[in-house]
Image (spheres, rainbow, N blue to C red):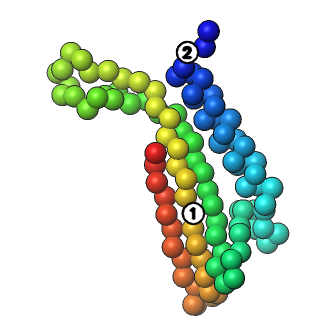
Amino acid sequence: MLNQSVLKKSLLAVAGLLVCAAASAAMDEESSAPAYRFGGVTAYPGLGLALKNDSNIFRLADTDPNKKSSMITVLSPSVVLQAGKDANAYSLAYLIDI
């Protein structure tokens, strides 16, 4: 039987691949980045997925015997909104690590 942690990580990885594939299907003809146009605003979505080792998941003191390390999955959705052109171009970016 699969460990639930391994199953969750596998499902997250598959979900990330599906989102990336869906985003690449909606590619803008002018660039290689996916872009969605809403009137005069262009949105560029992004998604990052990383596996990292957290050496102190409980945030305990270094000398605490209950200190534990573990692999963690970090999901990083982002969006960049751009409006205008050339000298009058404005952008707003949002990124979060979950």
Picture layout, residue 45 above or below residue 47: below
Task: For the N terminus, give its image quadrant.
Answer: top right
Picture layout, residue 16 above or below residue 78: above
Asked which secondary structure carries label 2, the reply is loop
> What is the count of numbered marks?
2
At x 66%, y 75%, the residue is 42
Picture layout, residue 81 above or below residue 79: below
Percent x, y of residue 97: 46, 49
| Category of crowding for the residue at label 2, using alpha-carbon neighbours closer than 10 angstroms: few (below 14), some (14–19), many (at least 20) | few
Asked which secondary structure carries label 1, the reply is strand
Percent x, y of residue 53: 43, 29
Quadrant of the rendered structure where residue 31 is?
bottom right
At x 64%, y 70%, the residue is 43
| Category of crowding for the residue at label 1, using alpha-carbon neighbours closer than 10 angstroms: few (below 14), some (14–19), many (at least 20) | some
Percent x, y of residue 94: 49, 63
At x 54%, y 76%, the residue is 91
Which of the two discs, 2 and 1, sits closer to the camera?
Answer: 2
Q: Check disc 1 and give the amino acid type.
A: Val
Q: Mark 2 — residue?
A: 3
Picture layout, residue 33 above or below residue 47: below
Percent x, y of residue 64: 18, 20
Q: Mark 1 — residue?
A: 79
Q: Check disc 2 and give the amino acid type.
A: Asn
Say which label, 2 or 1, has the lower sequence index.
2
Q: CA distance from mark 2 to mark 1?
A: 33 Å
